[in-house]
Image (cartoon, grey):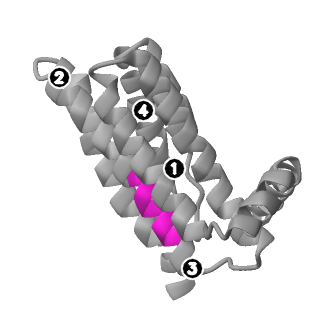
Amino acid sequence: MRNLAAKSRVTFDKWEARAKNVKDSLIRPVLVLFGKIGLSPFLASLIALLLGFLAIYMFFYSKEWFLLLIVSSVVFDIIDGALARFENKVTGEGFWIDFAFDRILLFAMMVAIYFTKGMDDFIYLAAPILYLVETIIYIFIHKKIFNITVRTIYFVMVYFSTFYATLIAVITDVINLLLFLSYFIYESSTSSSRAQ
Protein backbone atom coordinates (compact mmCIF):
# COMPACT_ATOMS: atom_id res chain seq x y z
CA MET A 1 0.00 0.00 0.00
CA ARG A 2 2.81 2.39 0.87
CA ASN A 3 4.46 1.60 -2.45
CA LEU A 4 1.24 2.52 -4.28
CA ALA A 5 1.07 5.87 -2.43
CA ALA A 6 4.70 6.60 -3.26
CA LYS A 7 4.16 5.72 -6.93
CA SER A 8 1.06 7.95 -7.05
CA ARG A 9 3.04 10.86 -5.62
CA VAL A 10 5.88 10.33 -8.11
CA THR A 11 3.39 10.20 -10.99
CA PHE A 12 1.72 13.41 -9.80
CA ASP A 13 5.10 15.14 -9.41
CA LYS A 14 6.09 14.14 -12.96
CA TRP A 15 2.78 15.36 -14.36
CA GLU A 16 3.11 18.64 -12.47
CA ALA A 17 6.68 19.13 -13.72
CA ARG A 18 5.60 18.51 -17.32
CA ALA A 19 2.71 20.96 -16.97
CA LYS A 20 5.05 23.63 -15.60
CA ASN A 21 7.50 23.04 -18.47
CA VAL A 22 4.75 23.47 -21.05
CA LYS A 23 3.41 26.60 -19.35
CA ASP A 24 6.91 28.07 -19.00
CA SER A 25 7.70 27.46 -22.66
CA LEU A 26 4.45 29.16 -23.71
CA ILE A 27 5.22 32.33 -21.76
CA ARG A 28 8.98 32.35 -22.37
CA PRO A 29 8.95 35.66 -24.34
CA VAL A 30 7.22 37.34 -21.39
CA LEU A 31 9.76 35.84 -18.99
CA VAL A 32 12.64 37.15 -21.11
CA LEU A 33 11.05 40.62 -21.16
CA PHE A 34 10.45 40.67 -17.41
CA GLY A 35 13.97 39.37 -16.81
CA LYS A 36 15.38 42.24 -18.88
CA ILE A 37 13.42 44.91 -17.01
CA GLY A 38 14.47 43.42 -13.67
CA LEU A 39 11.15 42.09 -12.40
CA SER A 40 11.93 39.63 -9.63
CA PRO A 41 9.72 36.64 -8.78
CA PHE A 42 8.92 38.25 -5.42
CA LEU A 43 7.88 41.50 -7.07
CA ALA A 44 5.64 39.54 -9.47
CA SER A 45 4.02 37.84 -6.46
CA LEU A 46 3.56 41.19 -4.73
CA ILE A 47 1.99 42.72 -7.87
CA ALA A 48 -0.37 39.71 -8.09
CA LEU A 49 -1.40 40.24 -4.46
CA LEU A 50 -1.95 43.98 -4.85
CA LEU A 51 -3.92 43.55 -8.09
CA GLY A 52 -5.99 40.89 -6.34
CA PHE A 53 -6.85 43.18 -3.43
CA LEU A 54 -7.70 45.97 -5.84
CA ALA A 55 -9.92 43.50 -7.73
CA ILE A 56 -11.73 42.55 -4.52
CA TYR A 57 -12.34 46.22 -3.80
CA MET A 58 -13.61 46.82 -7.36
CA PHE A 59 -15.90 43.78 -7.16
CA PHE A 60 -18.37 45.91 -5.22
CA TYR A 61 -18.27 48.80 -7.68
CA SER A 62 -17.56 47.49 -11.18
CA LYS A 63 -17.68 43.85 -12.28
CA GLU A 64 -15.77 44.71 -15.45
CA TRP A 65 -12.87 46.24 -13.50
CA PHE A 66 -12.99 43.29 -11.11
CA LEU A 67 -12.60 40.85 -14.00
CA LEU A 68 -9.78 42.83 -15.61
CA LEU A 69 -7.87 43.17 -12.33
CA ILE A 70 -8.36 39.58 -11.21
CA VAL A 71 -7.20 38.23 -14.58
CA SER A 72 -4.14 40.51 -14.31
CA SER A 73 -3.53 39.19 -10.80
CA VAL A 74 -3.72 35.59 -12.00
CA VAL A 75 -1.32 36.34 -14.86
CA PHE A 76 1.26 37.75 -12.43
CA ASP A 77 0.67 34.79 -10.13
CA ILE A 78 1.47 32.44 -13.01
CA ILE A 79 4.51 34.48 -13.96
CA ASP A 80 6.13 34.56 -10.50
CA GLY A 81 6.91 30.84 -10.33
CA ALA A 82 7.79 30.63 -14.02
CA LEU A 83 10.13 33.60 -13.62
CA ALA A 84 11.81 31.95 -10.62
CA ARG A 85 12.36 28.77 -12.64
CA PHE A 86 13.55 30.77 -15.68
CA GLU A 87 16.11 32.68 -13.59
CA ASN A 88 17.06 29.62 -11.47
CA LYS A 89 15.85 31.40 -8.33
CA VAL A 90 13.48 28.73 -7.04
CA THR A 91 13.54 28.70 -3.23
CA GLY A 92 11.49 27.29 -0.41
CA GLU A 93 10.81 30.84 0.76
CA GLY A 94 9.46 31.72 -2.68
CA PHE A 95 7.08 28.77 -2.53
CA TRP A 96 5.74 29.88 0.85
CA ILE A 97 5.43 33.52 -0.19
CA ASP A 98 3.43 32.53 -3.27
CA PHE A 99 1.37 30.10 -1.21
CA ALA A 100 0.64 32.69 1.48
CA PHE A 101 -0.26 35.44 -0.99
CA ASP A 102 -2.60 33.12 -2.91
CA ARG A 103 -4.31 31.91 0.24
CA ILE A 104 -4.65 35.38 1.75
CA LEU A 105 -6.23 36.71 -1.42
CA LEU A 106 -8.73 33.89 -1.79
CA PHE A 107 -9.62 34.03 1.90
CA ALA A 108 -10.13 37.82 1.68
CA MET A 109 -12.51 37.37 -1.24
CA MET A 110 -14.50 34.73 0.64
CA VAL A 111 -14.77 36.94 3.72
CA ALA A 112 -15.79 39.95 1.62
CA ILE A 113 -18.53 37.92 -0.03
CA TYR A 114 -19.68 36.63 3.36
CA PHE A 115 -20.06 40.15 4.76
CA THR A 116 -21.82 41.53 1.70
CA LYS A 117 -23.96 38.66 0.49
CA GLY A 118 -24.40 35.88 2.91
CA MET A 119 -24.54 36.66 6.59
CA ASP A 120 -27.83 34.76 6.64
CA ASP A 121 -26.65 31.90 4.44
CA PHE A 122 -24.51 29.15 5.97
CA ILE A 123 -22.58 28.36 2.77
CA TYR A 124 -20.99 31.83 2.72
CA LEU A 125 -19.72 31.27 6.27
CA ALA A 126 -18.63 27.69 5.61
CA ALA A 127 -16.40 28.64 2.67
CA PRO A 128 -13.82 30.79 4.53
CA ILE A 129 -13.86 28.55 7.61
CA LEU A 130 -13.26 25.35 5.62
CA TYR A 131 -10.64 27.12 3.54
CA LEU A 132 -8.79 28.27 6.65
CA VAL A 133 -8.86 24.78 8.17
CA GLU A 134 -7.68 23.24 4.88
CA THR A 135 -4.85 25.78 4.64
CA ILE A 136 -3.64 25.09 8.18
CA ILE A 137 -3.63 21.33 7.58
CA TYR A 138 -1.92 21.69 4.21
CA ILE A 139 0.88 23.73 5.76
CA PHE A 140 1.85 20.69 7.83
CA ILE A 141 1.59 18.01 5.13
CA HIS A 142 2.22 19.87 1.85
CA LYS A 143 5.05 17.62 0.69
CA LYS A 144 3.14 14.42 1.38
CA ILE A 145 -0.12 15.00 -0.44
CA PHE A 146 -1.44 17.26 -3.15
CA ASN A 147 -4.55 19.35 -2.84
CA ILE A 148 -7.02 20.61 -5.37
CA THR A 149 -6.83 24.35 -5.95
CA VAL A 150 -9.54 26.42 -7.57
CA ARG A 151 -8.21 29.96 -7.23
CA THR A 152 -8.57 30.95 -10.88
CA ILE A 153 -11.88 29.13 -11.33
CA TYR A 154 -13.21 30.67 -8.12
CA PHE A 155 -12.42 34.25 -9.14
CA VAL A 156 -13.86 33.82 -12.61
CA MET A 157 -17.00 32.20 -11.16
CA VAL A 158 -17.38 35.08 -8.68
CA TYR A 159 -17.79 37.37 -11.66
CA PHE A 160 -20.85 35.38 -12.77
CA SER A 161 -22.29 34.03 -9.53
CA THR A 162 -21.04 34.40 -5.98
CA PHE A 163 -23.23 31.52 -4.86
CA TYR A 164 -21.85 28.99 -7.37
CA ALA A 165 -18.29 30.20 -6.82
CA THR A 166 -18.76 29.68 -3.09
CA LEU A 167 -20.35 26.28 -3.67
CA ILE A 168 -17.38 25.18 -5.80
CA ALA A 169 -15.00 26.41 -3.08
CA VAL A 170 -16.87 24.52 -0.35
CA ILE A 171 -17.00 21.31 -2.39
CA THR A 172 -13.30 21.56 -3.18
CA ASP A 173 -12.45 22.22 0.46
CA VAL A 174 -14.48 19.20 1.57
CA ILE A 175 -12.73 17.01 -1.02
CA ASN A 176 -9.33 18.29 0.16
CA LEU A 177 -10.24 17.68 3.79
CA LEU A 178 -11.33 14.14 2.89
CA LEU A 179 -8.01 13.62 1.08
CA PHE A 180 -6.18 14.86 4.17
CA LEU A 181 -8.27 12.58 6.40
CA SER A 182 -7.52 9.56 4.21
CA TYR A 183 -3.83 10.46 4.37
CA PHE A 184 -3.93 10.61 8.19
CA ILE A 185 -5.82 7.30 8.41
CA TYR A 186 -3.34 5.66 6.05
CA GLU A 187 -0.36 7.05 7.96
CA SER A 188 -1.73 5.95 11.33
CA SER A 189 -2.51 2.44 10.05
CA THR A 190 0.96 2.02 8.52
CA SER A 191 2.72 3.38 11.59
CA SER A 192 0.75 1.07 13.89
CA SER A 193 1.49 -1.94 11.67
CA ARG A 194 5.20 -1.02 11.66
CA ALA A 195 5.16 -0.79 15.46
CA GLN A 196 3.85 -4.35 15.75
User: What amino acid type should be assigned to the residue bearing mark 4?
Assistant: Ala
Above or below for 37 versus 91 = above
> In which quadrant is the N terminus drawn?
bottom right
- Above or below, 27 against 166 in this view is below
Along the line of sight, the residue nearer the viewer: 2 or 155: 155
In this rendering, which labeled residue sits more in front, label 4 or label 2? Answer: 2
- Amino acid type at image mark 1: Leu
Q: Which of the labelled discs sits on residue 92, or is there none?
A: 3
Secondary structure, mark 3, is helix
Q: Say whether disc 4 or disc 2 marks the residue closer to the N-terminus.
A: 2
Q: Which residue is mark 1?
A: 179
Instruction: Give the image location of residue 171, x and y in percent.
Output: 44, 30
Q: Position of residue 67 (x, y in %)?
A: 49, 25
Q: Are marks 3 and 2 in contact (CB under 8 Å)?
A: no
Q: Magenta span covers which residues?
A: 95-103
Report which quarter residue 7 is drawn in.
bottom right
Q: Alpha carbon of mark 1 to alpha carbon of mark 4: how far?
A: 15 Å
Q: Is residue 97 magenta?
A: yes
Q: List the residue tagged with mark 2.
A: 116
**Total number of numbered discs in the rendering:** 4
Q: Are marks 1 and 3 in contact (CB under 8 Å)?
A: no
**Residue 132 spot, x, y in % from top left:** 30, 51
Which quadrant of the view contains residue 4? bottom right
Image-quadrant location for residue 95: bottom right
Identity, as a three-letter code, of the amino acid under mark 2? Thr
Sequence-wise first label, 2 or 1: 2
- Identity of the residue drawn at 34% across and 61% down: 136
